[in-house]
Amino acid sequence: MGVVQAVVFDFDGLILDTETPIFEALAQLYDRHGQVLEHDFWRTVIGRGHDYFDPMADLETRLGHSLDREALRADELSLRNQLLAVQRVLPGVLDWRAESAALGLRQGVASSSSRAWVLGHLERLGLAGGWDCIRCGDEVAAAKPAADVYLAAVDCLGLEAGQVLAVEDSAPGVAAAKAAGMRCVAVPSRMTAGSDFSHADLLLDSLADVTLAEALRLMR
């Protein structure tokens, strides 16, 4: 492994807690139809691409009949957006970004979500600028846990994988980073806590717990 020259952040659950609003909105839809969307199951979905699991198809399978998917998606989107609107940047993210810049490290984002989703939220949060590279799930062949999006980010940065530190909140994300040959800090979110992060190089409760410099020292 070389000296770290860049930090690449996951987006959902790491920069912004989008995962809780998505789960809560879907859980309410399931409840309206007498079904339960289990947190333990949903945790296995987090971090993967949008086509990994179709909640509407799952509901139809459980109920044994078709549903008005367009209406359901409109309801889910409305509730999700209400819940997302009150979410703020997660603790420590801004500090790590500032420290990365102070240390002369390049910065990137690697997400399984679409580019429109990631950029839309970054713009809303005032965080759209300052990134050296952003790579998303709709720009690569396979979403996490495949290495594709991280390999694309490394290539975009013009570095070797061993020179780039990934920061992740999900087990599929950690698997993707390690498959790409990167070091990885895992920071479980509210939704991913309890997942297997044994392959991460460092496990933190929050990015606010330690400085980036401290994290780099702890991984040596």
Image: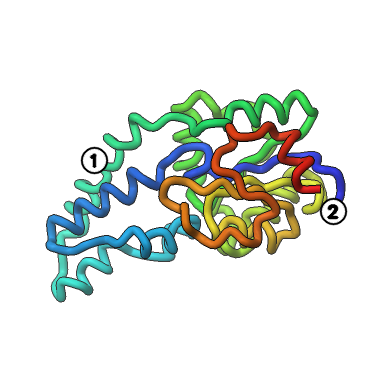
Direction from residue 183 to residue 175 in the image, left or right: left
Direction from residue 20 to residue 142 in the image, left or right: right
Secondary structure at badge 2 equals loop
Direction from residue 73 to residue 127 in the image, left or right: right
Q: Nearer the viewer, residue 172 or 80?
A: 172
Q: Give the percent coordinates (x, y) of residue 99.
A: 70, 27
Of discs 2 and 1, which sits in the foreground? 2
**Residue 1 bears which disc, if any?**
2
Q: Give the percent coordinates (x, y) of residue 115.
A: 51, 44
**Residue 212 bears which disc, if any?**
none
At 22% from the left and 66% from the top, the residue drawn is: 59
Q: Residues within 10 Å of mark 2 (few under 14, many from 20)?
A: few
Direction from residue 216 to residue 96 in the image, left or right: left
At 75% from the left and 34% from the top, the residue drawn is: 213
Quickly name the residue at label 1: 78
Q: Residues within 10 Å of mark 1 (few under 14, many from 20)?
A: few
Q: Quick check: marks 2 and 1 in contact, CB under 8 Å?
A: no
Q: Nearer the viewer, residue 204 or 141?
A: 204
Q: How is the image coloured?
A: rainbow
Among the 4 quarters of the image, the one containing residue 175 = bottom right
Q: Give the percent coordinates (x, y) of residue 73.
A: 24, 52
Three-letter code, disc 1? Ser
Three-letter code, disc 2? Met
Q: Earlier in the sequence, mark 2 or mark 1?
A: 2
Q: Nearer the viewer, residue 27 or 82?
A: 27
In three-dimensional space, the C-alpha distance between marks 2 and 1, rounded to whole angstroms, equals 45 Å
Secondary structure at badge 1 equals helix
At 16% from the left and 57% from the top, the residue drawn is: 31
Among the 4 quarters of the image, the one containing residue 3 = top right
